[in-house]
């Protein structure tokens, strides 16, 4: 007998028929002898609908109150799923975030989980109940409702799995696993049997929305075996797990894109110590996450500083920057939200050179101009005009051989390795 945490996303609970399907799956897992905790998201489109209501009231919502509104979508889902289980003869209890003390910090709209009280969940399980927990929401030390950022139910599920020392956490969604790229954009995308935590973390952080970044961080930290599966098929899905030697043989595991970033350039910044701190310090104080940063060699003591932020922080970031540069003699601020970031990820990059060059060649062959570049040990990202997103993703998918059937698990891609062996990117 195992303890399994299953998470069903918005599409999987998109209507009452789908909720009945979720109930059937949970009951099947329980009948197979497992203790089952199920984390559910709001019905698909519901969180966006709630955010639109907020926008109809104000374009500068108080973040605490906005969380009070958007957290309600999950409340509807847990009650309906619990009742669907009961209607099929099972026992079920639903819990809101605060009822299982999912305590977070007070960063409304992107709060971080600090602790979870597993006791009420264990108690309900011991009575033979399937426990249905609201994803995406928590409560801060003051008792205010908080939310964990878009896609946050994944993080709830993995955090609950870690708190319960569950045997597995299964994320059920509308695709049957993690693919080499978004299968809804590139039909040639291929499903991966396994992917290393680190690769999944990079893919999620560069836009593959199949898992929320923090859910992968939790899984990696607490070594939770994490499965991505379809709620509509019996496919075994993809296992996100520890890296092993065979994974390094594949150069690029996946291609991702992110249309959710916007670019800010501060022109003519004086090239003297302390200026970057004066700009990025206030952004940090406002909890604005800055992604790529590029600063060029200065000419005549001045340089341009370009960085990207999430689109939801774009207006706030512009205000913060304007305020921050009041005392700095800069020559102007330029903004652009018609950008997208395309990225390639793979642990195999650690041991191979030429990967970035191959990426740039593939983009240039399609006439795509690269605006910014960023690399890590296992990732290369390029910011391009947003109109090229799909073209860039398809070109990279082809250029790194991902359109071809994947080699069987454990097989080495010898020609690739031989051709590219050498220094790092
Ligand atoms: N590499 C990838 N593998 C699988 N799905 C991906 C990938 N990159 C992006 N996706 C997208 O993630 C979607 C699933 O995430 P999401 O819509 O948040 O599901 P849910 O509502 O179930 O949480 C898929 O429909 C797919 O379009
Ligand atoms: N309802 C939240 C939380 C969530 O995780 O949703 P989904 O599982 O559908 O991505 C959102 O829309 O972001």
Image (tube, rainbow, N blue to C red):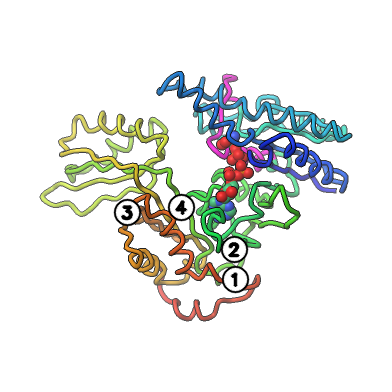
Viewer-nearest residue: 186 or 127: 186
Residue at the spot x=15%, y=46% of the render? 302
Tell us which disc is closer to us: 2 or 3: 2
Instruction: Determine the secondary structure under disc 4.
Output: strand
Alpha carbon separation for disc pair 1 and 3: 31 Å
Image side of residue 85 versus residue 323, left or right: right
Q: CA distance from mark 4 to mark 2?
A: 16 Å
Name the residue tied to disc 2.
190
Q: Earlier in the sequence, mark 1 or mark 3?
A: 3
In this rendering, does residue 216 appear at all? no
Mark 2 and mark 3 in contact? Answer it, CB < 8 Å: no
Tell whether 296 sits left or right of 115. Answer: left
Asked if marks 1 and 3 touch (Cβ < 8 Å), the reply is no
**Quadrant of the rendered image containing residue 86:** top right
Disc 4 target residue: 257
The residue labelled by disc 3 is: 372
Q: Does the image show residue 204?
A: yes
Percent x, y of residue 243: 60, 62
Q: Which residue is mark 1?
A: 405
Relative to 356, residue 203 above or below: above
Q: Toward the viewer: 179 or 275?
A: 179
**Range covered by the magenta-colored residues:** 139-160
Q: Left of 288 or right of it: where is 141?
A: right
- Residue under the image location 79 percent in, 34 percent down: 122
């Amino acid at each position: 007998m195992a303890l399994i945490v299953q998470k069903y996303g918005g599409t999987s609970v998109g209507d009452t028929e789908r909720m009945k399907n979720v109930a059937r799956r949970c009951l099947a897992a329980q009948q197979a002898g497992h203790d089952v905790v199920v984390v559910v998201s709001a019905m698909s489109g519901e969180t966006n609908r709630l955010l639109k209501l907020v926008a109809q009231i104000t374009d500068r919502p108080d973040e605490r109150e906005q969380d009070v509104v958007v957290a309600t979508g999950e409340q509807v889902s847990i009650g309906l799923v619990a009742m669907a289980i009961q209607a099929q003869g099972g026992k079920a209890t639903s819990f809101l975030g605060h009822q299982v003390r999912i305590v977070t910090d007070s960063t409304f709209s992107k709060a971080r989980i600090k602790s979870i009280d597993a006791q009420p969940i264990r108690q309900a399980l011991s009575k033979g109940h399937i426990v249905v927990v609201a994803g995406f929401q928590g409560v801060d030390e003051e008792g205010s409702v908080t939310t964990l950022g878009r896609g946050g139910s994944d993080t709830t599920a993995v955090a609950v799995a870690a708190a319960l020392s569950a045997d597995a956490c299964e994320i059920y969604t509308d695709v049957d696993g993690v693919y080499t790229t978004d299968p809804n954009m590139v039909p040639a995308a291929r499903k991966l049997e396994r992917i290393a935590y680190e690769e999944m973390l990079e893919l999620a952080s560069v836009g593959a929305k199949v898992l929320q970044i923090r859910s992968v961080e939790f899984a990696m930290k607490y070594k939770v075996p994490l499965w991505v599966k379809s709620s509509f098929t019996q496919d075994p899905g993809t296992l996100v797990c520890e890296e092993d030697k065979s994974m390094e043989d594949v150069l690029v595991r996946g291609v991702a894109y992110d249309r959710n970033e916007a670019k800010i350039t501060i022109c003519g910044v004086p090239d003297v110590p302390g200026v970057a701190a004066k700009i990025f310090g206030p952004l940090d104080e406002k909890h604005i996450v800055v992604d790529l940063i590029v600063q060029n060699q200065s000419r005549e003591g001045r340089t341009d500083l370009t960085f990207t932020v999430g689109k939801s922080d774009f207006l706030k970031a512009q205000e913060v920057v304007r305020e921050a540069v009041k005392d700095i003699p800069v020559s102007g601020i330029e903004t652009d939200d018609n950008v997208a970031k395309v990225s390639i990820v793979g642990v195999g990059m650690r041991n191979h050179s030429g990967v970035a060059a191959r990426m740039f060649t593939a983009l240039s062959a399609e006439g795509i101009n690269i605006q910014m570049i960023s690399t890590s040990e296992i990732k290369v990202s390029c910011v391009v005009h947003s109109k090229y997103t799909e073209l860039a993703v398809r070109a990279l998918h082809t250029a790194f051989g991902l359109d071809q059937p994947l080699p069987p698990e454990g097989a080495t891609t010898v020609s690739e390795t031989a051709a590219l062996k050498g220094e790092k990117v």
